Image (spheres, rainbow, N blue to C red):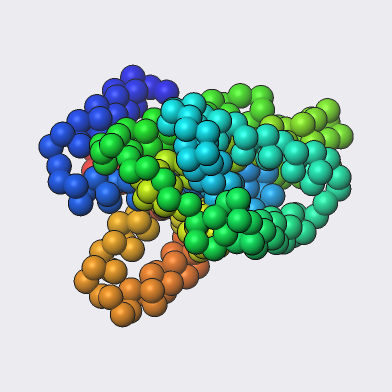
Amino acid sequence: MTYFKLGLTTVAIIILIALPQVTSLYFIAFMLAIFKYTTLSVSWNMLSGYTGYLSLGHSLFFGLGGYTFAMFMTKSNLHWLPSLILSGLIVALIGLMLGFILLTSKIRIAYFAMITLGLNEVIRVLVTNSDTLGGGSGIMLPPIPSASLAYYIMLVIVLTSLLITYVLDRTSMGLGLKGILQDEEAASATGVHTAKLKISVLVLSTFFPGMMGGVVAWNWSYIDPIMAFDLILSFNMVIMATIGGIGTLWGPVLGACFLTSLIELLSTNIQHFHGIIFGFLIVVTILLEPGGLIQLIARVKSYAFKKIKVTTA
C-alpha cells in the first residue's frame, strides 16, 4: 500500500469515527445498513470470490450468529462483548465442521451452492419449530444503549473483515485460493493444499456474518427465523459483490455502498417500482460490465491517463 493510499484510508477511517457525532439518527441508520451489507458481501467474497465455490445460503451464518448472541444475552445474561465474540466463534466452528464435511470431498461447485441454499432452509424450519429458540415468534432482546454503539461495533467488524481480506489477498494463502479458482486439480497437482485452504477461508467467511448477525439482532432488539434466515439477504450478498467486482478487495465494498444507497433512494422516492428499476439496473450492469464497478473505474482511469498523455505530448 502506497503512502497516498495509506493516508487516504486513515482520513476515511477518521471521518467514519467522527460521523455519529455530527450527523442525524437517520443517517446513522443508513450507515448501519451499509456496514451490514459491506461485511456480508466482503465475507461472502472471501469464499466464493477467491475459490469459486458459490454459496447461495450465506444468510445461514448471519442467522446463526444472531440467535447465538440472543441466547447468550437472554438465557445466560452474559455481557454483550463476550456474547458477540462467542457468536462469531461458534458460527466459525460450525463453518469448520461444514468445511470438513463438504470441502474435503470432490463436491461439484454447483452442488455446493445447492447444499448451502438447502441448509439455510432446513435450519430456518428447525428454528421455527423450536420452543427453546422462541419458535416462529422469535426472541426479544434488551435494547441496545444507543445507535452510536451499534455504529462503532459494526465499524470495527467492517474494518477487521477488510483487513483480513487485504492480508489474505497478499499472502501465499491468497495465491493458493486463486489457483483453486482457476483450476483446482492443477493447483492440487502443484502442491497446493486445496482442502485445507478452502476450509480455512470458509471459517473466516462465516466468522464475520456471525458477529454481524448478533449486532443486528441487538440493534433491532428482536430476532425471528424469517429475519435471521432471509434468502434475500444471501442473494443481496451475491449481487453486491458481483456488481462491485467479485474476487477483489474493494469490489464488495463499492457494490454494497452503491446498491444500499440505490435501494434507499428508490424505495423512498419510487415506492411501487423501485424493485423493478433495481433489477433492471443489475441486469444492465452485469451485461455491460461483467468485471463490476472496479473494472469500470479501472477502465475510466486508464482512459483518463491516456488522454492526459496525449494532451501533454
Depicted 70 relative to depicted 10: above or below: below
In the rendered view, tell whether residue 36 sits above or below residue 13: below
Query: What residue is rendered at 47% in x and 37% in y?
Result: 73
Taking the image as shown, residue 103 lies to the left or right of residue 215, namely right
| Residue 61 visible, this angle | yes
- Inspect this view and state whether residue 208 appears: no
The residue nearer to you, when weighing 45 against 30, is 30
Q: Residue furthest top?
A: 3
Quadrant containing the N terminus in the rendered view: top left
Q: Quadrant of residue 136?
A: bottom right
Residue drawn at x 61%, y 56% is 131
| Picture quarter with the C terminus | top left
Percent position of residue 253, x then y: 41, 44
From the top left corner, tell me how far across and down residue 51 is, in percent: 67, 43
**292 and 272: which one is in front?**
272
Can you name the residue that lies furthest to the bottom here?
A: 272
